Image: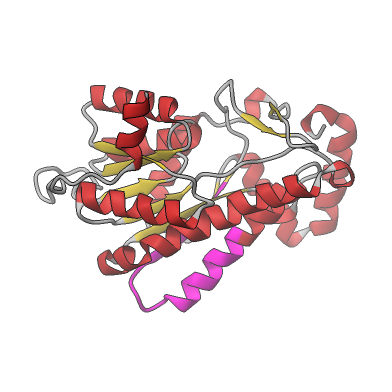
Amino acid sequence: MDTYVNKINTPSTHQPTQISESTSTQPFTGKVFLVTGSESGIGRETARELARQGAAVMLNGLRPDRLLETHRLFAEEGLLVDTCVADVTNWDDCQRLVDTTMLAFGRLDGLITNASVSMRAYFNDLDIDVFRTVCDSNIYGTVYPLKAALPYLKASRGSVTFISSVSALNGLPSGSAYCAGKAAVSNLAHTLRLEWHDTGMHIGVVHIGFTRNDPDKRVFDAGGQPVPIAHRPPNLQMTQPQVAQRIARHIRQRRQITVLTGTGRLNAFMSRYFPHLADRILLWSMRRWPRMYE
């Protein structure tokens, strides 16, 4: 395993893979994407969907064994991917991640900032270091990869997609740090869209709703210990491949904002036009289904 860790942490010296732009009618043929947090979960399925639609994809994560297994599965499908272990909250790691992508594929057309951590605890009980860790993963875990990749994305007039959450639209009890981080990312996207309006770049946000996560997915409790995610009604959840397909469509159409799930879209509508009623409904749901918030 040590050999593999060194391999996927160190930019290779081989010539970039030649990316064809004309041999397929797939929508992302000839494009290169970097998907952070793509060793598992939604990030993994997004990377798979982009690769199935013709893209070359750089996979990223923190767990070498999980990243190796994802790479193996994709290679068996004939998908063009490479891997790099990197912590997206570390600036030097992000520079190395982008350098590795350029060495592997020679260009960069899209960035999906998916990597982040979440939590489930009421603010009164939440350790301040946990709050900071969650915010760092969502905010700097978006800012650092984007800043490192920016010269190449500008050159390709590429696409940037921030993975946010419907909870960023009006907040969610027991998710204060996560909601704050995702709301910051959403507003960052709006700001950058204004600043870069004449660059030809695409800046978008996808607000993820309830999703069927990996069984081993964990979030932080009040003291920073990993615990299972809160209960979610199965009938309200999208599958990970469904989410990935919607993210790919969002990128193809260069949309500014996409809100997923019917519940998510209803939440967005109610929060915008009937905020007081939306709060009353949320408070009622806390009493009716406390397992969703505890």
Identify the residue shown where x is 48% and y is 37%.
Answer: 62
Above or below residue 99? Residue 212 is above
Q: Position of residue 89 (x, y in %)?
A: 54, 51
Q: Position of residue 231 (x, y in %)?
A: 73, 26
Scheme by which the image is coloured = secondary structure
Q: Residue 185 falls in which quadrant of the image?
A: bottom right
Q: Nearer the viewer, residue 9 or 195?
A: 9
Does 197 appear in magenta? Answer: yes
Identify the residue shown where x is 28% and y is 56%.
Answer: 108
Is any part of residue 96 visible from this angle? yes
Residue that lies at the very extreme toward the front in this rendered image:
2
Q: Position of residue 251 (x, y in %)?
A: 38, 52
Above or below residue 67? Residue 263 is below
Screen quadrant of the N terminus: top left
Q: Nearer the viewer, residue 109 or 150?
A: 150
Q: Would residue 231 appear left or right of 194 to someone viewing this image? A: right
Is any part of residue 257 visible from this angle? no
Label total for image = 0
Q: Would residue 43 appear left or right of 283 to someone viewing this image? A: left
Q: Residue 158 falls in which quadrant of the image?
A: bottom left
Screen quadrant of the C terminus: top right
Does 262 appear in magenta? Answer: no
Q: Position of residue 14 (x, y in %)?
A: 15, 45
Identify the residue shown where x is 28% and y is 46%.
Answer: 11
State the extent of the magenta-drawn residues as a range: 185-207
